[in-house]
Amino acid sequence: MNMTNEPNRTDWLLARRQGIGGSDVAAILGLSKWSTNIDIYNEKVSTETPIDDPTPRMRWGNILEHPIGVEYANQTGFKVIRENRLLRHKKYKFLQANIDRRILGQKKGLEIKTANQYAADDWGEPGTDQIPQYYIPQVMHYMIVTGWRSWDVAVLIGGQDFRIYTVDYNPALADVFIQHCRHFWQCVQDKTAPEPNTLAAVNSLYKQDNDQTVIADETALDLMQRLKHQRGERDDYKKLSEQTEKDLKIIIGENKYLVDDDGNRLATWSTTKNNSRTFRANFKNLGAPT
C-alpha cells in the first residue's frame, strides 16, 4: 500500500481519473444503483475540469460522516482516525482508495454510510456481513488496496437506526474484482469504451440514434423472440426482460431501426424531442421461432 498526501477537492477529483476508486467498482461490475460502467469510463477519459456538484444524498452523507464515526467509536470502544491520504495498491497502481476511517491498533478500516428507511431491507442483521450487494465491491476494494483482511461498515438508516457490520476478505471474490478492474482500466488506457453491462449502461452509451437501420441476424431474432415471451410472463418479468432489452440495444447501437431480411420493422429505438431514446418492440412482424 502506497500513500500520497490528500489533495484539495479539485485535485482530488482530478486524481480520481488516474485510477479506480472504491466507489467505482460496483458500477464497473454492473451492481451500482447510481452509475454505470459507461458513466465511470466517461469520467476517467474526460479532459474537462471536474465540477464539484454533490447530490443531496452525497452532501448529507458527508455532513453525517463525523457523528456516525463518533457513535461507532462509542459503541465499539475502538479509536478511529481519518486517513487523509490517497492509498494505492503496491502492484496495480491504478487501484486507489480514499477510506473513511482507520481503526487504530488494527489492520482494519471503517466505511460510513447513510440510508433512507426505504433501503432498510437491503441491510441484514447487525453484526453480520449482510450489507447491500452494491457496497460489497467497495469494501472489498479497500481491503485489496490496503492488504487488510477485515472492514467494518457503520450505517445510519432513516436518521435513527444505527447498525454495524463486519465484512471479511474473500480471496476468490477479490481475484474476480481485480480481473474486472484490470480489463476496465485497459479500456480507459485504450480510449475504448467497455461493453455496457446493464440496461442503464447501454442507454448511457447510445444516447442518440443516427436514423439508420440495422438488419437483424439470428442472435437479434432470438432475442426478439425471448423478449416477446418474457413480456408475456408476470413472474420476474422486469429482471429478465431488462437483460434481453440490453442485449438487443447493443445490437441496434446508434441505429434507429431493427428490421428483418424483408425490411419488416422489429424494433425502434429513437431519439425523442427531449434528447432521450425510446425503445419499442414490434412483435406483430416477428415470425414464429425457428
Image: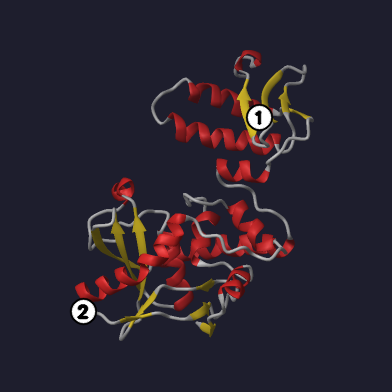
Q: Position of residue 283 (x, y in %)?
A: 60, 17
Asked if the residue at tag 1 contacts the one at tag 2, i.e. Cβ–Cβ closer than 8 Å, the answer is no
Place residue 275 in its image quadrant: top right
Q: How many marks?
A: 2
* Amino acid type shown at disc 2: Gly
Q: Position of residue 104 (x, y in %)?
A: 32, 84
Q: Specify how the rendered protein is coloured.
A: secondary structure
* Amino acid type shown at disc 1: Ala
Quadrant location of the C terminus in the rendered image: top right
Q: Is residue 24 above or below residue 1?
A: above
Q: Residue at position x 52%, y 78% from top?
A: 86
Under tag 1, what secondary structure? Answer: helix
- The residue indicated by pointer 2 is 77
Q: Nearer the viewer, residue 183 or 104?
A: 104
Q: Residue at position x 44%, y 29% from top?
A: 237
Q: Which mark is residue 117?
A: none
How far apart in space, not on screen, are marks 2 and 1 (Cα)?
Answer: 59 Å
Q: Position of residue 105 (x, y in %)?
A: 30, 86
- Dot placed on the residue nearer the N-terminal end, 2 or 1: 2
Q: Position of residue 193 (x, y in %)?
A: 69, 53
Q: Which mark is residue 220?
A: 1
Q: Residue at position x 33%, y 51% from top?
A: 116
Under tag 2, what secondary structure? Answer: loop
Q: Would residue 66 be found to the left or right of residue 252 on screen?
A: left
Q: Is residue 196 above or below residue 65?
A: above
Q: Is residue 72 above or below residue 29?
A: below
Q: Residues within 10 Å of mark 1 (few under 14, many from 20)?
A: many
Place residue 167 in its image quadrant: bottom left
Q: Nearer the viewer, residue 219 or 114?
A: 114
Q: Nearer the viewer, mark 2 or mark 1?
A: 2
